[in-house]
């Protein structure tokens, strides 16, 4: 509320008798002199300046703070519009519950008086009547803060927040009444009186009107689920959540639209409280309409690609049942195809016409390619530790290149694969009609880790562990790692340094030293040595490398025949080539990794062992529904001694265990010692050949924490040098497990079930490890 005119007082009560003529003249003169000052005042307000602004009524808020919120200033010409805006600005501060601006005229100049009434300070928040939900949990939900001003609006908002909390917990009929108690002019307390009512669970979900699609299939798409005694307490399902239920309307509609029902209508959710308030029924109603197929697909504005070129890459085909999600995917595919040619802001709009008689639709993709744009500048922000060049060298675009959407995606993948950042944003920003700036914003995460621990590994028994890793040394992308394991069956020390861009070229340099002792029961194997290797990127997805290794092997104890005790030295050169198209090295969902390595050892390299060893490894990842992933993995390895030398025992293949075939003890799916003097269950000899297949279905359980579940099928075996590789001899298992992609590496807990146990073998085995995946 505000005033713009001063109060005017005039004389009243003229009672003198006058003649009519004289009276008429007198009245004219009187009116003239009465209205003259009023006209001057109005004109003064419209043309005079503001001489003074006074603030009254404020107690805590400084007058200077209030004046700083005003557009009106001393010396300004008075303006009704400015006054209205000033009042709006003052209310927007949320400091005041009442504001009045009045004006007074002093010597043809205006004095503004701003009268305010400050909001009370919240002294206390009280909850009354809450038995089912703790006061602490209620306080976490409210946004009111003691010691700060508050308003009725804030209280109402918090009533809704509390009501939502009770509904999430199943108390759908809970009522909340707020009472504001003024304890003084400046302070007040708020009490929320709560009547919780009974907890109401969902007993039934009905989807009526379904004739062409089974109701059961639709219910599987819903986030709202009925209450189940055995499982709902784990997942909080069976409790009505308004946002989820409203989203279920869209999920039902989407299900129909993806199956050609283009005129489907879905209403709901309607809620029924049944069985004396103990249970709830959720109702959705569907009008399905008819199913439509695609009659013709056409394009408009496609002056870069021919119709056939675009039809080849989209999934929608003539004669197929219409699917809206497929249509959306096709729009993205077309946009990406144009983006690869530099049309980064191309747009695609589908024009769909339907024939109600034939139940067919025609789809025309209207393409607006826009301007072809180049990258003016690449800006990198958010990297406090990581050097710019570490990020910049992973970007598959250079300044003044045409903007390419596939290159942007690949750049994101490569930066993400560094594993230095928890968040990455790559955003093109238009600066001119044909130029963009590429803004790369990252949020770094810790790349150094120090961990100590212990546990039980099915492979190595009880183990202690010490791990010190820095994956981004000095912000240069270098890796330095020291790892030690101390266990019943294995003790190892390992130091690794890796420079991924040696001399600022796409050439990696890796240096590694190790010392490992493995206890096989009757005998031990100690391997001590080091490796130095260089690798090189070959194109976008290919890489190759050469590694020289030197190690001393000591076999002690009483090794079974044909193993021999004593020392030997292996000096070898390993060449490798790999192709890796995985979208994420640490948690892949699509792409594949294929590698081939050949290790050659001979005396002229500095040792006394001579052998050749080759390993072929392949992994293929396929995205499935709901962020799940299907993995097919295979590996074939073969080794052979040269010129009368045996294939060294530490180089042999040990098939069985969590890294090869689960459900078997370490190495027990390989060749075992059956000669006299061996243990009754057979000593481990290792194998000269291995063949392994793994199939996994990976399910994200807690995505934010990178915890996954896995179902698997394994098949494989190890074979002696005089044995042929036979598929009929492969050992098989199935099982399930959990994986956590922790900062120190994947933690795996998996249970394997041996499908054909032999005498002395367990049927099922729990296995735990800290290490790599396939």
Image: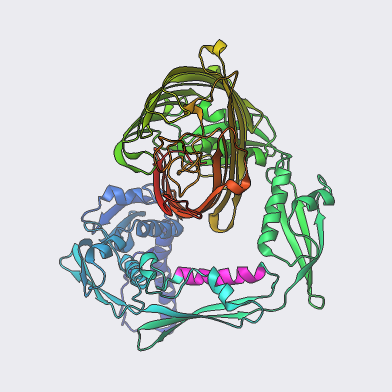
Q: Depth check: 593 or 96 in front? A: 593
Coloured how?
rainbow
Which residue corresponds to the image point at 33% horizontal and 62% vertical from the top-left?
A: 102
Locate residue 654, reporting x and y percent. 49, 37
Q: Is residue 468 above or below residue 416?
A: above
Q: Where 567 sits versus 165, above or below?
A: above
In-image side of 693 versus 4 (left or right): right
Q: Which of 467 and 189 lies nearest the eye of the viewer?
A: 467
Total labels drawn? 0
Residue 628's image quarter? bottom right
Magenta residue span? 243-257
* Residue 217, image quadrant: bottom right
**Measured from the top left, where is residue 723 in percent x and y?**
60, 37
**Is 23 in front, or is 655?**
655
The reply, left or right, for residue 321 in relation to residue 432 is right
Residue 752 in picture, x, y percent from top left: 45, 52
198 left or right of 244? left
Residue 40 is inside the magenta segment:
no
């Amino acid at each position: 509320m505000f005033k713009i005119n001063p109060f005017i007082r005039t004389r009243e009560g003229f009672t003198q008798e006058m003649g009519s003529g004289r009276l008429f003249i007198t009245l004219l003169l009187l009116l003239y002199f009465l209205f003259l000052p009023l006209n001057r005042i109005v004109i003064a307000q419209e043309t005079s300046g503001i001489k003074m602004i006074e603030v009254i009524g404020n107690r805590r808020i400084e007058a200077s703070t209030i004046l700083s919120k005003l557009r009106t200033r001393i010396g300004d010409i008075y303006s009704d519009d400015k006054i209205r805006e000033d009042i709006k600005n003052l209310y927007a501060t949320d400091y005041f519950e009442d504001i009045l601006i009045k004006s007074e005229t002093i010597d043809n100049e205006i004095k503004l008086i701003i009268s305010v009434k400050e909001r009370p300070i919240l002294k206390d928040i009280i909850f009354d009547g809450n038995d089912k939900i703790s006061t602490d949990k209620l306080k976490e939900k409210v946004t009111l803060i003691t010691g700060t001003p508050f308003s009725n609006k804030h209280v109402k908002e918090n009533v809704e927040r509390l009501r939502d909390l009770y509904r999430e917990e199943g108390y759908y009929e809970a009522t909340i009444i707020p009472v504001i108690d003024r304890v003084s002019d400046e302070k007040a307390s708020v009490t929320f009186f709560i009547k919780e009512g009974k907890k109401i669970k969902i007993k039934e979900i009905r989807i009526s009107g379904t004739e062409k699609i089974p109701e059961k299939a639709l219910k599987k798409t819903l986030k709202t689920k009925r209450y189940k005694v055995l499982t709902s307490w784990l997942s909080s399902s069976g409790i009505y959540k308004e946002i989820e239920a409203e989203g279920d309307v869209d999920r039902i509609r989407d299900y129909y639209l993806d199956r050609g029902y283009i005129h489907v209508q879905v209403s709901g959710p309607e809620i029924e409280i049944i069985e004396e308030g103990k249970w709830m029924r959720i109702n959705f109603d569907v009008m399905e309409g008819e199913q439509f197929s695609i009659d013709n697909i056409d394009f408009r504005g496609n002056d870069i690609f021919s119709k056939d070129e675009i039809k080849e890459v989209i999934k929608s085909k003539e004669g197929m049942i219409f699917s809206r999600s497929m249509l959306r995917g096709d729009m993205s595919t077309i946009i990406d195809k144009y983006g690869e040619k530099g049309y980064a802001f191309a747009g695609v709009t589908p024009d769909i016409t339907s024939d109600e008689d034939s139940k067919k639709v025609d789809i025309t993709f209207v393409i607006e390619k826009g301007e072809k744009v180049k990258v003016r500048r690449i800006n990198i922000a958010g990297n406090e530790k990581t050097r710019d060049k570490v990020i910049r060298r992973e970007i598959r675009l250079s300044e003044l290149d045409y903007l390419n959407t596939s290159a942007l995606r690949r750049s994101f993948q490569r930066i993400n694969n560094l594993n230095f950042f928890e968040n990455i944003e790559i955003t093109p920003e238009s600066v001119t009609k044909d130029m963009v700036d590429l803004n790369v914003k990252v949020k770094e995460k810790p790349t150094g880790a120090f961990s100590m621990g212990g546990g039980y590994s099915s492979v190595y028994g009880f183990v202690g562990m010490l791990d010190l890793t820095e994956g981004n040394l000095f912000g240069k992308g270098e890796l330095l790692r020291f790892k030690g394991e101390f266990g019943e069956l294995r003790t190892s020390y390992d130091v690794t340094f890796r420079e991924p861009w040696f001399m600022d070229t796409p050439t990696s340099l890796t240096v590694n030293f190790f010392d490992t002792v493995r206890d096989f029961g009757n005998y031990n194997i100690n391997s001590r040595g080091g490796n130095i290797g260089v690798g090189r990127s070959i194109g976008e997805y290919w890489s190759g490398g050469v590694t020289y290794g030197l190690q001393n092997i000591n076999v002690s104890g009483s090794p079974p025949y044909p193993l021999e005790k004593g020392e030997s030295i292996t000096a070898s050169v390993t060449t490798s080539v790999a192709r890796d198209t995985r979208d994420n090295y640490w948690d892949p969902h699509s792409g594949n990794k294929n590698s081939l390595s050949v290790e050659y050892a001979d005396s002229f390299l500095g040792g006394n062992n001579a052998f050749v060893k080759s390993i072929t490894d392949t992994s293929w990842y396929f995205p499935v529904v709901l962020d799940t992933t299907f993995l097919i993995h295979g590996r074939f390895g073969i080794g052979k001694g040269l010129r009368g030398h045996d294939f060294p025992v530490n180089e042999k293949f040990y098939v069985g265990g969590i890294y090869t075939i689960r459900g078997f003890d370490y190495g027990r799916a390989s060749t075992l010692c059956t000669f006299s003097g061996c243990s009754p269950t057979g000593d481990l000899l290792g194998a000269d050949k291995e063949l392994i297949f793994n199939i996994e279905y990976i399910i994200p359980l807690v995505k934010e924490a990178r915890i996954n579940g896995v179902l698997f099928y394994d098949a494989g075996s190890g074979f002696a040098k005089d044995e042929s590789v036979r598929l009929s001899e492969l050992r098989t298992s199935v099982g399930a497990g959990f994986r956590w992609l922790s900062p120190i590496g994947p933690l795996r807990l998996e249970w394997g079930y041996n499908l054909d146990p032999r005498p002395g073998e367990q049927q099922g085995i729990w296995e735990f490890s800290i290490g790599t995946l396939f």
